[in-house]
Amino acid sequence: QTSQQVRIRHDKFKLCALPAAVAHLNQIAARLEDEYAKLERHTMRPTRQALAAAIACAACATAQIDLADSAPSLKIRGVNLGGWLVLEKWIKPSLFKEWNAFDKKAPKDQWTYCEKLGKTECKKRLEKHWDAWVDESTIADLADAGITHVRIPIGHWITCNIDEEEPYVCGEWPYLQRVAGWCRDKDVAIWLDLHTAPGSQNGFDNSGRTGAATWDSSTGNVNRTLDVVRDVAERVRDDADLSAVVTGFGLLNEPDASIKYWRMLHYYEDAYAIIRDVLGKDVSVYVGDMFNPQSFNWFWTGPDAPQGPSNSAENVFLDSHIYACFVDDLKAMTPRQHVTQVCKFERDHVNQCCWDGMPPHATELKRFVGEWTAAYDQTPSPELEAYFEKHPRDLTPERFRFLQQFVLAQMMTYEATPEENLKYLPKKSIAGDFHGWFFWNFQMELDAYREWDYLRGVREGWIPKLERGVTVEAQTGTTCAELAAEASDCTTYVVDPFPKIPRWKGIPCVPPTKAEVVASFLLRALAVIGALALFAGGAYVVVVGAKKATSDCKRAMGYAPLNVELGRRKDFTRIDDAPPNLVDIDNPINIAA
């Protein structure tokens, strides 16, 4: 084959390789010819056996340039099409602009949005949104940027499985089919993700309804979710475009750690069986890690596992989501600390699963990161959006360079091979193979969320256009360790946490001059002296006041000292003087005397 693109179909996966694969095939062909020529000289006449032997010899001789060399093309390099078929207010707030963002009764998720508008008006508005938020140019731009996959969140109502008390509306399917056609044209694979469930699996807005996570409290919720999985899978199977590009299926997004663990695992097994029954073995199945990947170390270990047939899964993945902007300890980090956190500690976090046995060996569950972003110091919220309107944040050269470093470090880490991982993991670690990533999100509406916008990052240059079949390290000529060493060890012009972190001051990038050091010392000394003076003055006032109050209290209670001249009443008769006239016994002075 000498076509521009070579498609290789394997037992468990599909991949699209660029002309680099053609070069590999040419090398294999050349070695085949050499081996065949050798055999022909020895046998004088080519035979089927000779040809088979030549192929076998060539296969051994070219092992170095087989899938190992093309491994980078197998890695997932994707983005999420978030805020499209499942609403998230912060992604596209214009849909909610008629309500006050700080009004507790205002819509804040898809449930309350449709509940407020009513089903007719809600569907009318959502159809405009479904039509415009993702268009053909979106997929073309993503493909041009080197994206190989898109992860598409879908609601459990997408097949119109809606209870009477639910305000949801359906009608998204034709728009999903349209996007599948565009993806097919651009060789972009789709991984569907069941993002919501009846009762909510996490209580977040991305589950369809904010509040309590009650999905696991009802067997009816779980069974209904399984029905949705089957309905969606059957529709995918029966659609030419969707069946051609849907190569992955997520069983449920971000189930909360509070969800009953065993009910979650039973659901995963039942849903996996449905996907295999409807879509076969070629479609990858992935599950959420419940924010604790270690808890899946024994799950789906392999077909020969002693636990029994429930572990005989294949072509399965565990999905982790990694964000820095929701934890104060991470938000306060310097750029160098952020990059080191990714290269070393997040790598170790992903590597905590999936293992089994002693010594540990990899299970059937493969690892990938289904959500990550370039945001690092500002937590999304209506307060941030309001703050950003008054205090726009410039893309300073320092911040631009850090965003480059932060993005590259995460790309390198989340698609690393075991050999690359061993360079950063603790000694004596067993390293796993990381199969890729999906950035959240493909685009955003507000400038406040610039770091969440992949296409904007590509346009502005802090996200690179990726070359298929080439590692990020090879394309950029750098490594994760070099990025960390190069990153700034101070926070000026880069780190500005929101909400503000108490007592956080950051680390200035420019060292102060001697005059500034002296002035700072004097100011601190004056502040200390002033504080001591205030304390002393306050203590004096308290002591004097206490003494006066005590004295006044004693006088009021009749305990005033009699040996003090001023303490006596002037009209009292002294004891040693003539006795008073007691005729007027009503006179209080006489009574007192």
Image: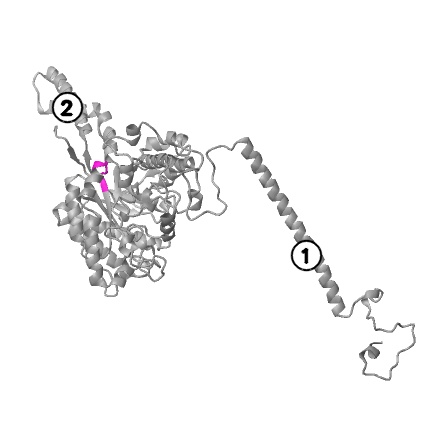
User: Which residue does the numbered mark 2 point to in the structure image?
Assistant: 29
SS category of the residue bearing label 2: helix
Residue 29: quarter of image: top left
Q: Is residue 458 left or right of residue 140?
A: right
Most prominent secondary structure in the magenta stretch? loop
Across and down, in percent, residue 74 comes to 24, 35
Across and down, in percent, residue 464 comes to 28, 34
Label 2 packing within 10 angstroms: few (<14), some (14-19), many (20+): some
Name the residue at 25% across, 38% down: 76
- State which quarter of the image contains the C terminus: bottom right
Compared to 535, does 563 lie above or below?
Answer: below
Span of residues in magenta: 144-149
Q: Nearer the viewer, residue 180 or 395?
A: 395
CB under 8 Å between discs 1 and 2 = no
Q: Is residue 169 visible?
A: no
Q: Residue furthest bottom?
A: 583
Label 1 packing within 10 angstroms: few (<14), some (14-19), many (20+): few
SS category of the residue bearing label 1: helix
Amino acid type at mark 2: Ala
Across and down, in percent, residue 252 comes to 28, 51
Q: Is residue 541 magenta?
A: no
User: Which residue does the numbered mark 1 point to in the structure image?
Assistant: 542
